Image (cartoon, helix red, strand yellow):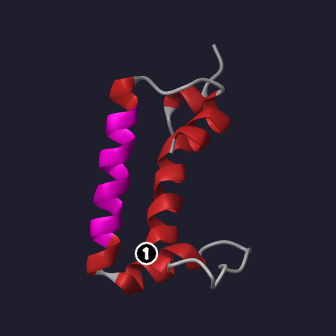
Amino acid sequence: IEWAFRLVLARRPSLEEKQILRTTLEKLQRQFAHDPEAARKFIEVGESKRNEKLAVIEHAAYAGLCTAILNLDEALTKE
C-alpha cells in the first residue's frame, strides 16, 4: 500500500492516511469477496489481459485501491 502511495505522490503516507488506505483495501476485499463476478468484471476493464496467476478478488481490491490513490486531488493537481 505504501509503495503504491509513494509511486503516485512521491511521499510517504501519514499514519492517518495509512489507516484509511488499509481500511479501504479491507472494504474492497469484503465487497469483492461477496461478489466475485463484480471483481472479474472490474479487472477485465482495459486493454491489458488479467494475469490468471493472481487471485481475482485480491487483484480487484488492490486495483481499486490504486485507482483511489490515482484519483486523490494531490495526484491530479499540481500547485
Residue 75 % position (x, y): 59, 32
Write down the residue under mark 1. Answer: 57
The residue carrying pointer 1 sits among few (fewer than 14), some (14 to 19) or many (20 or more) residues within 10 Å by Cα, namely many
Q: Nearer the viewer, residue 24 or 19?
A: 19
The residue drawn where x is 67% and y is 79% is: 51
Q: Nearer the viewer, residue 33 or 48?
A: 33
The residue drawn where x is 31% and y is 57% is: 26
The residue drawn where x is 73% and y is 74% is: 48
Q: Which residues are magenta?
A: 18-31
Answer above or below: position of 32 versus 37.
Answer: above
Please identify the dominant SS of the magenta region.
helix
Image-based side of 47 in relation to 29, left or right: right
Q: Nearer the viewer, residue 55 or 65?
A: 55
Q: Nearer the viewer, residue 75 or 28?
A: 28
Image-based side of 59 in relation to 39, left or right: right
Residue 78 % position (x, y): 65, 20
Badge 1 amino acid: Ile
Residue 61 placement: quadrant: bottom left
The residue drawn where x is 43% and y is 23% is: 14
Residue 62 % position (x, y): 49, 59
Q: Is residue 21 magenta?
A: yes
Answer above or below: position of 44 versus 8.
Answer: below
